[in-house]
Amino acid sequence: MHYKDFSAYMREKFPDVRVQKISVNAGFSCPNRDGTIGRGGCIYCDNSSFTPSYCFKESGVRAQIEAGKKFFSRKYPEMKYLAYFQSFSNTFGRSVMELESLYREALDIEDVVGIIIGTRPDTLPPEIVEMLGRLNAERPVIVEIGAETCHDKTLEIINRGHDWKQVEDAVFRLHEAGISVGLHLIAGLPGEDDDMVLESVRKAVVLPIESIKMHHLQILDGTRLKSMWERGEVDVTPFNVDNYIELCIKIIKLVPRNIAIERFLASSPPEKVVAPKWGMKNYQFVNLLNSRLSKDSM
């Protein structure tokens, strides 16, 4: 293997069991959506496009996790699970006590061996980090931070509401608390070329992180990005498969083997995707990428 993938990363953290993520929608919002620091959220965001259907059919943490367990256990009866608080910013807008109660509810469910918390760098004050450190002493906690890019001008264009220094600060504080950290990055954001993407990767991998999630920018129906793109207000040139594979190969060369690359592709429902329309699933892209890596190494 030319890079550490998510499966290898999970085998390192959980050597004795097979684990599967179960997404949880716990009803959070984001500070750039509800008026705390802005409104409308990120211009490309359609959270429903990557949230499993059971997260909307079932209410409550336990019901969603049990529905996810039922789905996955058909194929792998001995599977253990990570509760993945995925939708929006899962450390925002609630007291430390409320958050701890929510996370413990997930950890108390049979066969749940840890939690993954997706959030933003600016919603991790010291008291929340301290609480996460206590939980992590009992059961593994992974925090995924939406960084997206190291370029502050781009962060402003996409309405993130934070800067790169806040990303660095959050990563270091979580690491000092003993918590595993992953970063999420997006390739092809408005105004960014490949060199700018690679600069974001270089700045990410020198931080004390354990994983990176990378995906290409998708323009989704119903988002502000689609309207801005159609009106020519933002400079976005959607990737084709070949030039994105070329970029991914360059990214892989920058990422040390101690850092996992969890994914390369966004996986929004095809009917929501305006551009680029590849008609390709994540595993198909990964197969193409790995084939190219193997060919290049011969």
Image (tube, rainbow, N blue to C red):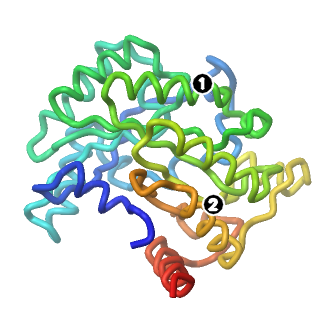
The answer to whether any part of residue 3 appears in the image is yes
Q: Toward which corner of the image does residue 101 lie, by quadrant?
A: top left
Q: Amino acid at mark 1?
A: Gln
Mark 1: secondary structure:
helix
Q: Is residue 48 left or right of residue 260?
A: right
Question: On residue 216, which mark appears?
Answer: 2
Q: Residue at x 50, y 25 (%)?
A: 170
Q: What percent of the width, then of the height, locates residue 154?
A: 76, 40
Question: On residue 277, which mark appears?
Answer: none
Q: Toward which corner of the image does residue 198 lie, by quadrant?
A: bottom right
Q: Is residue 210 left or right of residue 153?
A: left
- Please tell me whether mark 1 or mark 2 is closer to you in this view: 1
Q: Nearer the viewer, residue 214 or 39?
A: 214
Q: Residues within 10 Å of mark 2 (few under 14, many from 20)?
A: many
Mark 2: secondary structure:
strand
Q: Is residue 84 left or right of residue 275?
A: left
Q: Residue at x 21, y 56 (%)?
A: 19
Q: What percent of the width, then of the height, locates residue 20?
A: 25, 56
The answer to whether any part of residue 220 appears in the image is no
Residue 74 drawn above or below residue 227: below
Q: Amino acid at mark 2?
A: His
Q: Toward which corner of the image does residue 274 lie, by quadrant?
A: bottom right
Q: What percent of the width, then of the height, locates residue 24?
A: 33, 43
Q: Residues within 10 Å of mark 1 (few under 14, many from 20)?
A: some
What residue sits right under mark 1 in the picture?
A: 166
Which of marks 2 and 1 precedes in the sequence? 1
Q: Residue at x 48, y 78 (%)?
A: 290
Q: Nearer the viewer, residue 160 or 52?
A: 160
